[in-house]
Amino acid sequence: MPLRIVLELTDKDLRLLRKEMKRAQAISREKSELEVIQAADEVLESAKKREVPEFIAKHLETLQHLIGMLTDRQWLLPDKERNRVRTALLYFANPEDIIQDDVPVIGFLDDAIMIELIERELRHEIDAYRDFCEFRAKGGKAKKPDDGVLAKRRTQLHERMRRRRRTGRSKGGGSPVGFF
């Protein structure tokens, strides 16, 4: 029988998590994009070697999408958005996160919480990338980055991502997290 636990983060909790994210970003800021990607990839690989709770595994899938947004040669994420994703991944480049990953059962709990917060912050970027991957999968793997149809869809999704972010902020619908 599944058990549902709701975690409510207060403004104070969010301030503490923002502070932790900023600390991790400061420690990891000098790392190259490749080093940041490799560090996030190591978190994923480490989790795959362990039995992690399903709710953590679900959040780690989002981490995989974030990595894909930077490594996918067909997505061609523009610099501004690329920097937002890279900044989000800096938390995972810090070996001294809130809960050490090797702690049984809960070692990736802080990672899952941060991924949830990052997902709220980058929801438009993540949604656009997921839609792009779905579109590409339906069209076959033979598509090239310069393929007209794929390029047109990519451009549409990039524009949608920016428009939704602008609209969300102007209507007061911005993220309460405030990592970026």
Image (cartoon, rainbow, N blue to C red):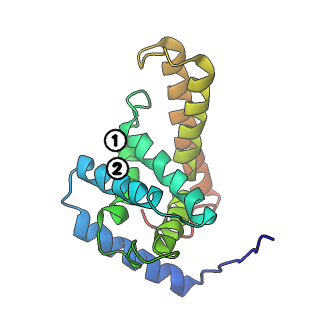
**Image side of residue 153 versus residue 97, left or right:** right
Residue in the image at 39% along x and 73% along y: 102
- Pointers 2 and 1 in contact (CB under 8 A)? yes
Residue in the image at 18% along x and 60% along y: 30
Residues under labels 2 and 1: Cα distance? Answer: 6 Å
Residue in the image at 30% along x and 62% along y: 93
| Residue sitting nearer the eye, 78 or 107 | 107
Quick one: quadrant of the N terminus?
Answer: bottom right
Other-residue count near label 1 (Cα within 10 Å), few / some / many at <14 / 14–19 / ≥20: few
Quick one: quadrant of the C terminus?
Answer: bottom left
**Image side of residue 1 versus residue 153, left or right:** right
Which numbered dot is residue 118? none
Residue in the image at 53% along x and 39% along y: 129
Q: Amino acid at mark 1?
A: Asp
Choose top left, top right, bottom left or bottom right for residue 70. Answer: top left
Please tell me whether mark 2 sits on a helix, a strand or a loop. helix
Choose top left, top right, bottom left or bottom right for residue 55. Answer: bottom right
Q: Amino acid at mark 2?
A: Asn
Numbered-mark total: 2
| Residue sitting nearer the eye, 104 or 28 | 104
Other-residue count near label 2 (Cα within 10 Å), few / some / many at <14 / 14–19 / ≥20: some
Please tell me whether mark 1 sits on a helix, a strand or a loop. helix
In the image, farthest residue toward the left: 30
Which numbered dot is residue 83? 2
In the image, farthest residue toward the bottom: 12
Circle 1 residue: 79
Say above or below: 12 vs 92.
below
Residue 170 image offset from top left, x and y in percent = 59, 56
Residue 67 image offset from top left, x and y in percent = 41, 46
Residue 99 image offset from top left, x and y in percent = 41, 78
